[in-house]
Image: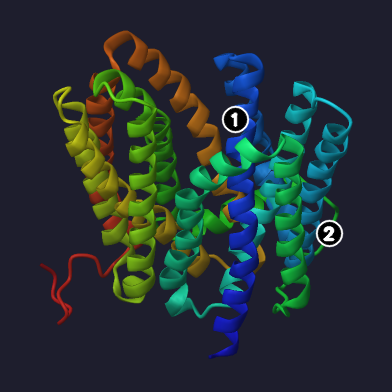
Amino acid sequence: MENWRRTFITIWTGQAVSILTSSVLQMAIVWYVTQRTGSAALLSLATLIGFLPQALLGMFIGVYIDRYNRKMVMILSDLLIAGAGLVLVTVGAFGEIPLWLIYVVLCFRSIGAAFHTPALQAVTPSIVPKDKLTQYAGFAQGFKSLSMVLSPALAAVLFSLWDLNIVILLDVFGALFAGGVLFLVRLPDHVRVAHCDGSMLTEVKEGFRALRKEPGLLELLIISSLYAFIFFPIGTLYPLITMTWFQGGVAESGVVEVVFAVGMLVGSFVLGIIGGRIRHVRAILSSMGVYGSCVLLAGHLPQSGLFIFIGISFVMGMVNPFFHGVQTAIYQTRIDQQYLGRVLSLTSSIGLVAMPLGLILSGTFADVIGVNRWFAISGGLVLLLFLVGSRVLPKRLDPHYGRTASGKAR
C-alpha cells in the first residue's frame, strides 16, 4: 500500500470513531433534552447552539488554519471537544446535568468542530494526489454515512443502559482517540501565510480573492448556498411528513432515516470507486436534478404512498455525496494550499448561515400549507436551481463539459 493511502486510512480510522461517538452523543442529548423539558423551543435552541458558532466564526477561523500547523489545529480541536465533554461527565457524576451547562458545552464543541472540519479538508490535498481527491472524498463521505446508519441503534441501546454522562465519556474517548491517531501520523506541512501586520480582515479578503480568481468557484458557492437553504430543511422535515402526511409512526420514521443513511453510504462508496473518472460539474448537476425530482415526487404522493417515499429516500441519500463530496474536491483541487483553509471555512460558514434561515422559512410555510405541499415546492425550487446551474456552471467551471471523447462540442 502506498504511503499516502496508509496515511489517509489511518487518519480516517480515528475520524470514523470520533464521528460515530459524536453522532451517538448528539442523539442522546436530543433525547435527554426532550425527556427533561418536552419543549420544542429548547430542543431547537440546542440544535442552533450546536452549529451557530461554526456559521459565525467560520470565515475568521480559516485564517488560523492557514497560519498554523494544521495537524496541531486538529489535535487541539479534539482536545477542546474532549475537555468540554469531561466537564459534563464530572458534573453528571455528582447529580443532574443542568440544561444551561449542556448549551455551553455544545457551544464549545461547535467551536472545536469549526476548527477541525476545514483543517481536515485543507490537509487532505497534501496527502491525496489531485487526481484521486474526488474518489477519496467519496470514501470520507462513506465514513460519515456509516455513522448515520449505526448511531441511531447504538444510541438507543446505550441511552437505555447508561446515564448521559457515561455516553458523554464515550465521546470523550472518541475525540482523544482521533487526536492520538493524528499525533502519530506524519503530515506534510503547508506554506503558511506570513503574520504581516496581524490584520485578520486582510487575510480573510485574500482568501475570498483566491476564490474569485478561479473561474466558476464564486458561482458554485452561490448555488451551493442556495441549495443548502432548501436542502437542510427538507431533511429535518422527514419525520413530519412521515408521521403526519403518510400517517406512519416512530418506527416508520426511523426506517426512513435509516434508509436515507444507507443510500448515502452506498452513494459514498460508489463515488469512491468511480470518483476519478467523473466530470465534477456533471456530477453536481445530476445530483441536484435527481434530488429535486425526488422531493417534487414525494410532495405529490398520496397518503398511502409511504413505501414509495421510503424508496425515494434511498435515492435522495444515494445522490447526496455526488454534490457535497464532489464540491469539496473541487475546492481542494483548484485552490492553492496557502489559501485553502480560509476558502473552505468561508464556504462552510456561508452554507451554515443559509441553513437556519431556510429552516425558519420552511417550518413556517409547512405549518400553513401542509408539509407535503412544501415538499413539492422545495422540489420545484431545487429543479429551478438545477436549471440555473446548468446554464452557469459548465461554461465557468468546466470547459470540457458537453464535449465528446474526441474533444468536439456536442
The amino acid at mark 1 is Val
Mark 2, secondary structure of its residue: loop
Front residue of this view, candidates 89 and 1: 89
| Rendering quarter of residue 273 | bottom left
Q: Which mark is residue 196?
A: 2
- Amino acid carrying label 2: it is Cys
User: Which class describes the residues within 10 Å of circle 2: few (<14), some (14-19), or many (20+)?
Assistant: few
Identify the coloring: rainbow
Residue 342 seen: no
Q: Residue at x 75, y 29 (%)?
A: 102
Q: Is residue 156 above or below residue 398?
A: above
Residue drawn at x 70%, y 43% is 167
Res 50 seen here: yes
Label count reads: 2
Q: Which mark is residue 187?
A: none
Which residue corresponds to mark 1? Answer: 30
Residue 188 against residue 367 in the figure, above or below: below
| Residue lying at 50% horizontally and 43% vertically, measured from the top left | 152
**Residue 120 placement (x, y as % from top left):** 63, 62
Residue 228, given in percent of the width and then of the height, sits at: 43, 38
- The residue furthest left is 410
User: Where does the image place residue 169, in percent across and percent down from the top left?
Assistant: 76, 47
Work out which residue is located at the far top of the displayed protein and give it: 368
Q: Earlier in the sequence, mark 1 or mark 2?
A: 1
Q: Whole-Å distance between the Cαs marked 1 and 2?
A: 44 Å
Q: Secondary structure at mark 1?
A: helix
Asked if residue 49 lies left or right of residue 143, the reply is: right
Q: Position of residue 186 (x, y in %)?
A: 73, 80
